[in-house]
Amino acid sequence: MVRRFLADVWTAMPGYIVDFDPATCTATVQLGVQAIVSIPDGSSQNVPITVLPDVPVMFPRGGGCALTFPVRAGDECLVVFGARSCGGWKQSGGSQVQSAPGRMHSLSDGFALLGTSSQPHVIGSLSTTTTQLRSDDGATFVELDPAGQMVHVKAPGGMTIDANVQVNGTVTASQDITSTGGDVKAGSISLKTHVHSGVQSGSSNSGQPV
């Protein structure tokens, strides 16, 4: 009797994204474990559980900041189910009355947590000493090394910074530095407009820039 009751209590299940709506941050999710259904001849069979529509997708967020990433069909997730009906909260936030009083641990009240992986899709070459924001293949990453107190950025396709940059330290470059639209200054001396003192014809060297 208890087991039959618990069969209708949904707590958490792995699944995968069928499609994702970035405007509402919700997804259609197919659960990754099938249901066992009894049939009239007394036997049973495994059948896929119906897809879950409009499942809110969780991104780490707080204090006016968020960490987002592209969500694609096939991405694995963990779906957790509310202990009570959450429809009112999904629509309005805050503290709401239960949209369906009496509904508990229902498939209608799921939330998708991205990042859970089955063994065929675990993150490869996982760093055990640093924190990384990285691509799955490890080719591109931003890495924080607490032991070395260093940050390492690897971006084979390049990096674009749309901001003024202030560097409070030594800059060392092993490749060319190219300025395409601005000026380069050493102290108050412009690379574009400076002139040299002591200019003479012939093989003499000019003086320092002024």
Image (tube, grey):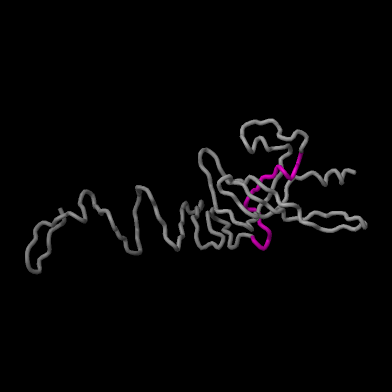
Q: Position of residue 29 (x, y in %)?
A: 67, 52
Q: Residue furthest left?
A: 201
**Quadrant housing residue 35:** bottom right
Residue at position x 58%, y 62% in the image: 125
Residue 210 colored in magenta in the image: no
Is 202 drawn above or below residue 198 in the view shown? below
Numbered disc total: 0
| Camera-nearest residue between 131 and 33 | 33
Q: Is residue 138 visible?
A: yes
x and y percentages locating residue 144 in the rendered image: 50, 53
Which segment is the magenta one? 104-121
Which residue: 8% across, 58% down?
198
Left or right: 33 as drawn, with respect to 113: right
Answer with left or right where residue 54 lies relative to residue 140.
Answer: right
Residue at screen point 31% across, 60% down: 177
- Indicate whether residue 111 is drawn in magenta: yes
Side of 81 relative to 141 (left or right) = right
Give me the residue at 85% from left, 43% from top. Answer: 5
Residue 145 in percent (x, y) is at: 50, 53
* Viewer-closest of 157 and 200: 157
175, 62: nearer the viewer: 62
